[in-house]
Amino acid sequence: MQGNIVLLFDRYSSDSRDLHESFKRAGYDLPVVVIGEDGFLPDDVISVYGSFLGNYKEAEGAAGRPLYFNEVPVPDQWETGGIGKDGKIHHLQEEKGRILFAKHSHKGFVKTVEWFDRRGIVRSKDYYNRYGVVYARTVCSAAGQEINRTWFSVTGQEVIVENCITGNIILNRADGIVKCFRSSLEFVLYFMRESGYGARRIFFNSLSTSFFAAQMFSAPGKEDRLFWQEPVGEEVPWNMRLLLQGWSGGRVQIMAQKRQAYDRLAALGVPEDRMHRLGYIYAFQKENRYRPEAFICTSSDQLTQCEELIKGLPQMHFHIAALTMMSPRLMSMGVYENVSLYPLVWIEEIAEFFEKCDFYLDINHGAEVLSSVRQAFLHNNLIFAFEESVHNRDLVAAEHIYAAGDVMKMIADLKAIMADETVLDRHLQVQREAAGCETAESYRRLVIDK
């Protein structure tokens, strides 16, 4: 049965990765096709664009690994530096370019280099892959508008040229044949036909290009699947309504992967026989050991009700870590005996806190640091948050999210949980259910065999 299925994603997002990994953990080795190439796709993921470029892993002259910021080729006397959100390229006092890093590596791997003109306008972008090679380049107008994008083969030849304004694509095949397409959708349809994947059942997770591709290959008796991973607004999305009405003749089941989305779609009248709630199969890293140790990962000193929690929970030890220096305000928390502060920790050290702690407090303002909520969840840390600063709601049970003014209620609940291991187990189960934890059996029953 699984040999007749392909996963088709517009991009390999974190949700796409979770779905892919869930199928593997359920014992299904399905081919995965991603429309958008980002240079850092796993080996077992097929890129529509990248499939025409050749094998960069074995390319002559490739570094064989991602580049760090100081390895980006620049003219003599130019300098690269600054691992923060972005890196910088400069000459004397003039900024020449900006280095963007791969989001999920956390190691400063180069993904994109933007080159500026003397006015500071982006005029071109070089896209690096995980083998340290420029696999694509975008040229921009004097106003900074993207004009065209070119993908290169492992030997540096132009293989794909896309007009960013009209959407037209030219493919220079290895056999010398030139193919022209009016849009990226036409290009994707060509790939699906040539590869044979279009004849399979298509499991997709977007109502964008992958949705239209699936519909073009739809046929009576061929049941595809939409894995819905996005929020739902005031009404059922237009493309989803077309799908439910049998627009192209095929029948598509909807697998809502987030609890809020499932509840909302059900409230909007999506028929029960067309929709199911199906989460992910997670790979947990450890069991909760019931230790009164709480971890907080932050990049600022803005921690909601932190001091009140510290004073109200003397039996809990708080480990507060930051990748940066800590302000005097945050350092002042060190006066409490149940607080340990860790400024300027290495990224590699962060994982140790998830191992040694069994609670995680998602109370830092600003951006989430190093996907810390997800890491806490995968380490079976019981996660608590405030409404004003919660980051990843999909992995935090609604019962564990409080208004900032209800800090005393959070303190009372944490005391009760720490006092009874069975209560903690019950709250962990609530957390897993809220995140949609699934089993291999549920994937087999709802996805493959249904």
Image (cartoon, rainbow, N blue to C red):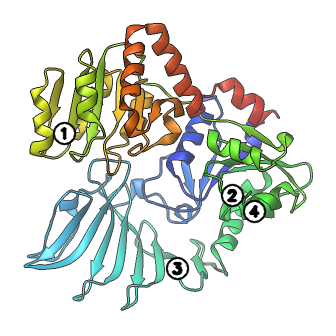
Q: Is residue 258 visible?
A: no
Of the image marks 1 and 3, the number of the one nearer the N terminus: 3
Q: Amino acid at mark 1?
A: Trp
Q: How many marks?
A: 4
Query: Residue 239's mark?
Result: 4
Of the image marks 2 and 3, the number of the one nearer the N terminus: 3
Query: Residue 234's mark?
Result: 2
Query: Residue 16's mark?
Result: none
Rendered location of residue 97, percent (x, y)? 24, 75
Q: Amino acid at mark 2?
A: Glu
Of the image marks 2 and 1, the number of the one nearer the N terminus: 2
Q: Amino acid at mark 3?
A: Val
Rendered location of residue 408, percent (x, y)? 36, 27
Mark 1 Cα-neighbour bin, 10 Å: few <14, some 14–19, many ≥20:
few
Residue drawn at 46 percent across, 60 percent down: 38
Mark 4 Cα-neighbour bin, 10 Å: few <14, some 14–19, many ≥20:
some
Of the image marks 3 and 4, the number of the one nearer the N terminus: 3
When the figure is inspected, residue 192 is found, relative to residue 319, above or below; the finding is below
- The label nearer to you, 3 versus 4, is 4
Of the image marks 4 and 1, the number of the one nearer the N terminus: 4
Q: CA distance from mark 4 to mark 1?
A: 45 Å
- The label nearer to you, 2 versus 1, is 2
Asked if the residue under mark 1 is in contact with the one under mark 4, i.e. CB atoms within 8 Å, the reply is no
